Amino acid sequence: MTKPKSRSTLYRLIEAGQLAHQALLVPLRDRGLEPGDDAVIFALHASLGATEDALAEALGLDRAALDPRLARLMDRDIIGRQAIGPELAPGLALTERGDRIRELLAGNWQQLEDALFSDLPKKQQKHLRKALKRLVDLLRMT
């Protein structure tokens, strides 16, 4: 096998992915949060009032892995229990603080997306999205 070339497209893609991942962790760590907490925050924003079981399923985690994270996020006033809907079913929701953190994380994500696409016309952005999706799909099949 030949050594990967540092100027190859795949090498640059991997490098960009690693650096983007690190950049997305900065606002989490600045707030004392852990990697993966953002997934909980975004999932709860998308499905207000989710039960612990529904949230675990959406995140692909078992309850034993999720429960300590939820307890820590509740202690930090990022999520809370809330009665939702006409039946007032118990569920989880973001607190005001949690929603502010979600907005900050989403803004950071958007800044990285904007940096990625800033020099590309809309048509090339679409082609890049399709090519990356195709690569991800191919790699998931292996």
Image: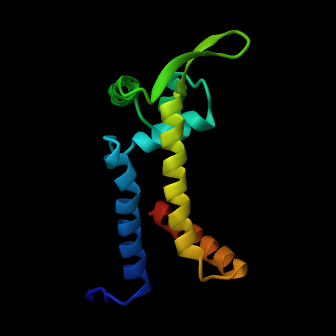
- The N terminus, quarter of image: bottom left
* Residue shown at the point (54%, 55%) measured from the top left: 107
25 left or right of 131?
Answer: left
Q: Is residue 77 above or below residue 84?
A: below
- The C terminus, quarter of image: bottom left
Q: Identify the colour scheme used.
A: rainbow
* Image position, residue 85 (x, y; %): 70, 16
* Image position, residue 3 (x, y; %): 25, 87
Query: So how many labels did they put on this image?
Result: 0
Examine the rendering and report whether any part of residue 59 can be seen: no
Examine the rendering and report whether any part of residue 99 can be seen: yes
Q: Is residue 74 above or below residue 114?
A: above
* Image position, residue 76 (x, y; %): 36, 28
* Image position, residue 21 (x, y; %): 38, 61
Q: Nearer the viewer, residue 63 or 96?
A: 96
Q: Nearer the viewer, residue 67 or 24?
A: 24
* Residue shown at the point (62%, 38%) measured from the top left: 46
Q: Quadrant of residue 88?
A: top right
Q: Quadrant of residue 71?
A: top left
* Residue shown at the point (63%, 72%) measured from the top left: 130
Q: Is residue 16 above or below residue 64?
A: below
Q: Nearer the viewer, residue 32 or 68?
A: 32
